[in-house]
Image: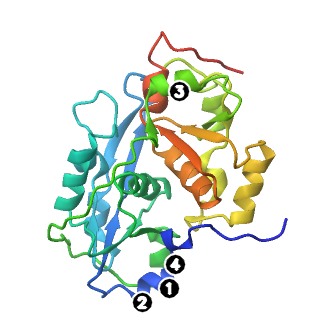
Amino acid sequence: MSEINWKFPEYISSFEWLKDNLDNDKVRIFDCTTYLLYQDQNPSLPYIVESGFSEYQVSHIKNSAYLDLQKDLSDNSSKFRFTLPDYYTLAKNFSNLGIGDSFHIVLYSRNGLQWATRIWWMLYVLGFKNLSILDGGFNEWKKNNFPTESKINKFEKSEFKIEIDDTTFVDKKRVLGSMNKKNCVILNSLTEDIHNGENPRYGRPGRIPGSLNIPFHELTNLEKGCFNTPSECLEVFNKKGITNNSRVLNYCGGGIAASLDAFVLFQLGYNDIEIYDNSMSEWATDENLPIEIG
C-alpha cells in the first residue's frame, strides 16, 4: 500500500514541535493521564478510576498542567465513570482550567493515547479546534531527554466560543436503532477476549450484536506511545471492510478507547463518526439490551 498522510495533521504534534514551543505563552500543555484499576470479578464496578496527578507531581512535561478527567470533566452524578456532562457545564469547566480561544492546547498522556483522544473529542464537539495531541507518550519524551519538571502549573481562566456538535457522542437508544442498518458499522475497540465474551468484565459477557472488533492498541505503537502510520491504520480498517462511506459507531467500556479508534478514523477522512459514551459499562448491565458472544 502506498504511503498516505493524515487528513488533519494540525491536530497531531511532534516532540520537536512541542520542544520548540514549550515557552510559547500562546501554547498551553495538559497531562491527561488517568489509570484504571480493573476488578474483573466485580461487573457492577469494573474498574476503579485513579487520577494521574500523583505521577504528574513527580515529573511532567515542562510548563504543563494536569487535567483530571473524572473529577473535573465528567458527570459525577452518573453511576458510570467518565459520563459526559452537559455541554455547557463541560465548556465552563474547560474554561476554568485555562482553555480558551487565545491558546493552542496540546494534550498528552503517559499510558496510552486514548486519554488524550478522549479529551480531544470532548473539546472538538464544543467547537474548540485549536488543539493537538502529542504523538508519543510522556515516557518516550523523558527517555529522549526533552525538558521535564516537577513544579505544579495551573493556568488562568480563559474563554472560547461554543459551537456544540451534539451528534458525535451518542446514547444506547441511538446504538439500538443503529443495529442491522446497512450503512452503519458498530465497532468495538476493546480487547478480543472481552469482545468474544471470554472476559465478562462489564457484566454480561459479550458484545453489541453485529459489532466488529478493532482493539484500540492495534492502531498505536505501545512502546513509543505514538500512532501507527496512516497507511498501517487504514489497512487495519480495510481488512474489516470498513469504508469511508460508512457511519462508524464506536464503543468500548466507557467511551475512552473508542475515542482513539474514532480519532484515527477522523484522521483517515471518515466523515460519519460516533462514540457511544457509556459503552459496555451501561450496555452489559442492562438486561433489556441484546448481547452476543462467540
Quadrant showing the N terminus: bottom right
Q: Are marks 2 and 1 in contact (CB under 8 Å)?
A: yes
Determine the CA span between mark 1 and mark 3: 41 Å
Q: CA distance from mark 2 to mark 3?
A: 43 Å
Residue at numbered disc 4: 14
Say what secondary structure mark 1 lies in: helix
Name the spot of residue 284 as percent of width and height, x first.
49, 21
Residue type of the residue flagged with mark 1: Glu
- State yes or no: discs 1 and 3 in contact (Cβ < 8 Å): no
Assign a secondary structure to mark 2.
helix
Q: Position of residue 48 (x, y in %)?
A: 35, 37
Instruction: Identify which residue is drawn at 42% across, 66% down.
Output: 108
Helix, strand or loop status at disc 3: helix
Q: Is residue 163 left or right of residue 137?
A: left
The numbered mark, 1 or 3, whose residue comes first in the sequence reads 1
Q: Which residue is mark 1?
A: 16
Q: Earlier in the sequence, mark 3 or mark 4?
A: 4
Residue 200 in sight from this viewpoint: no
Q: Disc 4 residue type?
A: Ser
Query: Could you say which is closer to the camera, residue 39 or residue 236?
Result: 236
Camera-side residue of 175 and 19: 175
Q: Position of residue 192 (x, y in %)?
A: 66, 36
Amino acid type, label 3: Val
Element on which disc 4 rests:
loop
- At label 2, which amino acid type do we have? Asp
C-alpha separation, residue under disc 3 versus residue under disc 4? 35 Å
Instruction: Residue 81: name its quadrant.
Output: top left
Instruction: Identify whether 10 is placed above or below 24.
Output: above
Instruction: From the image, tell me which residue sits under label 3.
Output: 175
